[in-house]
Image: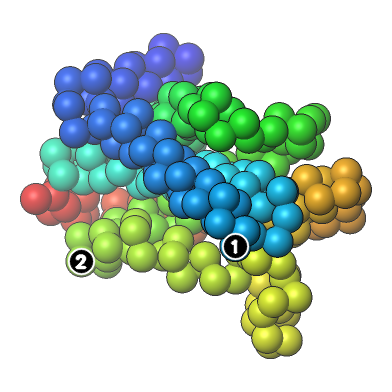
């Protein structure tokens, strides 16, 4: 199993390293986004347009955490799409490689891509904008891991839909996550939403995660109940997404259309 898993991850790494645009999407965009939003935040603070000195930390911490979710989802979806674009998925599935091993390799590759892109961005934010991102302490790892799992869940759902309904659904890789954005309470508290939107927001992990982040930065209070709710919701959605993805692969196998997918 480990040799097959290593072969899959090595394949994805080689695909990324051999492409300048792919490397740019990993390293360039996260850092440039932090810089742009950082200058915007500084402008607000310097012109007394922000309510408190914590505004910069609120905004940049929210941007970094949201980018973790976005990069995890996009990293998984794009890695899987490489198999579709190259018409290689059918070849993989007639080898001894199991579906569970493909899933695990996608997860590991997505984690590596997300880490490589965001670690430099976090240090850029700390150096240039004095962001106290690490004041989240032990809970920082919990927030990051939960958001990565949200991204993976979305990635598997999108990949499964593309697998089942064709490449017309590839746009969901970018669109789906922005449908979730208004309900995630990334840049504003839950109370800012209308009542019906608050109910919808609480059905998804990001709202609980970002509410917890704001509480820690604002007054050092840890909302353990929100952390546990986000964790349980993540387990449920991730298992559901993986189950759906496996069902889509099984359906395509039965219909014999795996070799028809591609550019």
Looking at the rendered image, the disc whose residue lies closer to the viewer, 1 or 2, is 1
Total numbered circles: 2
Element marked by disc 1: loop
25 up-or-down from 70: above or below: above
Between 84 and 72, the residue placed more toward the observer is 72
Query: Neighbour class for label 1 at 10 Å: few (<14), some, many (≥20)?
Result: few
Between 123 and 51, the residue placed more toward the observer is 51
Describe the colour scheme in one phrase: rainbow
Element marked by disc 2: helix
- Mark yes or no: residue 209 visible: no
260 up-or-down from 5: above or below: below
Q: Where does residue 22 sit, x and y in percent of width and height?
A: 24, 32
> Most extreme residue toward the top, as rendered?
3
Q: Which residue is mark 1?
A: 49
Between 33 and 156, the residue placed more toward the observer is 33
Residue 168 bears which disc, if any? 2
């Amino acid at each position: 199993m480990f040799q097959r898993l290593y072969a899959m991850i090595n394949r994805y790494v080689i695909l990324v390293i051999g492409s300048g645009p792919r490397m740019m999407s990993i390293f360039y965009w996260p850092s440039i986004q932090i810089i742009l939003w950082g200058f915007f935040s500084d402008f607000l603070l310097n012109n007394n347009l922000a309510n408190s000195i914590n505004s910069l930390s609120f905004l940049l911490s929210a941007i970094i955490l949201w980018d973790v979710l976005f990069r995890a989802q996009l990293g998984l979806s794009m890695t899987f799409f490489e198999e579709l674009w190259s018409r290689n998925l059918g070849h993989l599935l007639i080898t001894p490689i199991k579906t569970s091993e493909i899933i695990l390799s996608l997860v590991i590759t997505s984690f590596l891509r997300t880490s490589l892109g965001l670690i430099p961005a976090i240090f850029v934010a700390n150096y240039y904008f004095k962001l106290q991102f690490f004041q989240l302490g032990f809970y920082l790892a919990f927030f990051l891991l939960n958001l990565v799992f949200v991204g993976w869940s979305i990635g598997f759902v999108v990949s499964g839909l593309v697998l089942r309904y064709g490449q017309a659904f590839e746009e969901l890789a970018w669109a789906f996550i922005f449908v979730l954005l208004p309900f995630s309470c990334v840049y504003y508290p839950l109370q800012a939403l209308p009542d019906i939107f608050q109910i919808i927001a609480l059905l998804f992990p990001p709202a609980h995660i970002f509410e917890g982040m704001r509480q820690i930065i604002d007054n050092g209070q840890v909302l353990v109940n929100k952390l546990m709710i986000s964790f349980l919701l993540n387990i449920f959605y991730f298992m559901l997404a993986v189950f759906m993805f496996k069902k889509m692969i099984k359906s395509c196998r039965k219909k014999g259309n795996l070799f028809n997918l591609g550019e």
